[in-house]
Image (spheres, rainbow, N blue to C red):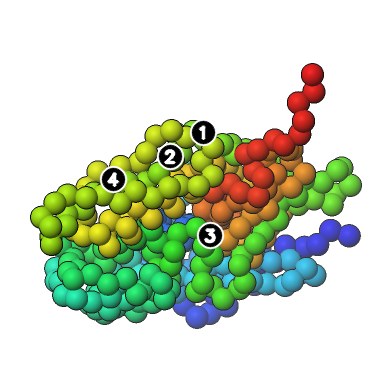
Amino acid sequence: MLDEAIFEISGAGIDVTERFNPILQHLQVEDHSGETTDKAAITLSDKNGEILLPKVGDSLSIMLGWRTAGGLTQVFNGIVDAVISRGSRTAGRELTISAHGFDTEGKAKEPLEFHKDKASLQDFMSEAAGKAGLSFQAQSKVGAINRDYWAAGTESFIHLGQRLAHEVGAVFKIEGSQAYMWPLNTPFYGVGAGDGTIRATWGQGDGSGNLIEWDIAPIVGRPRFNQARTRYFDHTKATWNEIAQAIGGMGNAAAAHTHRQPRADQAEASDTSGANDAVSTREAGTGIVKIRGEPAARSEGSCIVSGVRAGVDGSYRIDGVRHELTRSAGFLTSLELKQPGGGAGTDSRPVVP
């Protein structure tokens, strides 16, 4: 017997599941890896304009799952930021409630201008977050990075977090009133739900697999480099030097990646080379898989692809997640994949003469 997809929606602290169930047309949730905030969109049939218009700034929580296989899992918790009415003579009226993972009316988008001397990233970003009305927590290794000088130069807390994440090889994300930063290519430690490993398995016609379709390039040549190189100024010797860091697993890549901007000292140069190493490793392959709805999928988790073919099967980093629930197709999850590993990109079968 096929399982039944289920959902639960709360708006402004009120459970609206039963009210939305007969009029729900499309539900979509996107979980991205830091560069783009989490998003949700709920499209409802709005016959005669009878739905009470939601308010921008209302809280919105969404849970998805299966009735007999695991129940419900929260996939979104955010703030309504737009309500859109659409209609035509043929389609009638629809109302779409759009939400983001944090308050887009808040102070996170307000430019900051301050500096902090001889401090850790955790201390500097905590102060920046406080000015934006938020809290900040970095994974210990990232948070312990120390610099003689940190500065926010007329940039918002959002842009500041993204810039520093690029510099130190991390992911920056805001969820509600809490901001996080953790190393790139590692699971999001703030989720608290294991390592986020998801399986995408192609069945053998017996219905055993959950993989519906795929589009994967396990090897992409352009982002691959053999080393990451960054220049810095040695103040004690008044000379320019460089940090060169080997990038493993890049096959026949011959080019070295040289960071365009010199860094202030050796420590910053080392962080930047490490960041470029992580990006090159991450971008070495790419793809998309669509699977049976999986509410446990999280960005920065892992996806194990199997049953597709030699050279494609293996492990991948999840760069983005999109959950969709519709009356026609049911509950489906699409995963954007990066960072191939576990044999992906290598066909080890012997060559047949």
Q: Give residue 181's quadrant in the image.
A: bottom left
C-alpha separation, residue under disc 3 versus residue under disc 2: 25 Å
Q: For marks 4 and 3, give the one nearer the viewer.
A: 4
Nearest to the observer: residue 12 or residue 139: 139
Residue 225 marker: 2
C-alpha separation, residue under disc 2 versus residue under disc 4: 12 Å
What amino acid does circle 2 point to? Phe
Is tag 2's residue or tag 4's residue first in the polypeptide sequence?
2
Residue 52 locus on image (x, y percent): 47, 68
Q: Give left or right: position of 248 versus 79.
A: right
> Circle 4 — which element?
loop
Q: For marks 4 and 1, give the one nearer the viewer.
A: 1
Q: Residue furthest left?
A: 238
Q: Looking at the rendering, in which quadrant would you find the N terminus?
A: bottom right
Nearest to the observer: residue 162 or residue 156: 162
What residue did someone put label 1 on? Answer: 252
Residue 73 locus on image (x, y percent): 64, 71
Nearest to the observer: residue 195 or residue 30: 195
Q: Are marks 1 and 3 in contact (CB under 8 Å)?
A: no
Nearest to the observer: residue 137 or residue 20: 137
C-alpha separation, residue under disc 1 versus residue under disc 3: 29 Å
What amino acid does circle 4 point to? His
Whether residue 111 is visible, yes or no, is: no
Q: Are marks 2 and 1 in contact (CB under 8 Å)?
A: no
What residue did someone put label 3 on? Answer: 299
Q: Residue at x 58, y 42 (%)?
A: 287
C-alpha separation, residue under disc 4 versus residue under disc 1: 21 Å
Q: Are marks 3 and 2 in contact (CB under 8 Å)?
A: no
Q: Give left or right: position of 150 versus 64.
A: left
C-alpha separation, residue under disc 2 versus residue under disc 1: 9 Å
Is tag 2's residue or tag 1's residue first in the polypeptide sequence?
2
Compared to 158, does 213 lie above or below?
A: above
